Image (cartoon, helix red, strand yellow):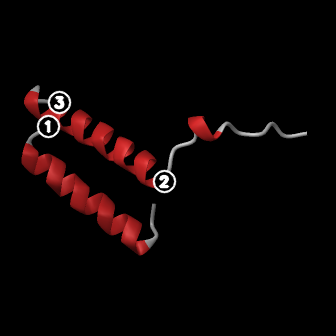
Amino acid sequence: MAEKLDPKELVSFKELLMANSIQVDAVAQLLIEKGIITNEEFFAKLKQVQSKYQKGDH
């Protein structure tokens, strides 16, 4: 039988989404600050990936 989940350990979808967004933002900022990628490269890739997702091609 499945275990009952502890409501104190559950997070909302909004909290999960916010945590994920913060983590992705932090990683992107680190890559840019360390000179691994440029701001322009990041936004170009972001647009490319967004376009693929919108087309359902991911």
Residue farthest to the front?
8
The numbered disc on residue 37 is 1
Q: Total marks drawn?
A: 3
The numbered disc on residue 13 is 2
Q: Amino acid at mark 1?
A: Ile
| Residue in the image at 13% along x and 48% along y | 41
Which secondary structure, mark 1?
Answer: loop
Q: Nearer the viewer, mark 3 or mark 2?
A: 2
| Residue in the image at 42% along x and 54% along y | 14
Q: List the residue tagged with mark 3.
A: 30
Q: Earlier in the sequence, mark 2 or mark 1?
A: 2
Q: Nearer the viewer, mark 2 or mark 1?
A: 2
- Which quadrant is the C terminus positioned in? bottom left
Comparing 20 with 52, the one in front is 20
The percent coordinates of residue 3 (x first, y second) are: 81, 36
- For the residues labelled 1 and 3, say whether their Cβ atoms are less than 8 Å apart: no
The percent coordinates of residue 35 (x first, y second) are: 8, 29
Residue farthest to the right?
1
User: In the rendered view, does 32 fall on the left or right side of 11?
Assistant: left
| Residue in the image at 40% along x and 65% along y | 53
Q: Amino acid at mark 2?
A: Phe
User: In the rendered view, does 38 fall on the left or right side of 14?
Assistant: left
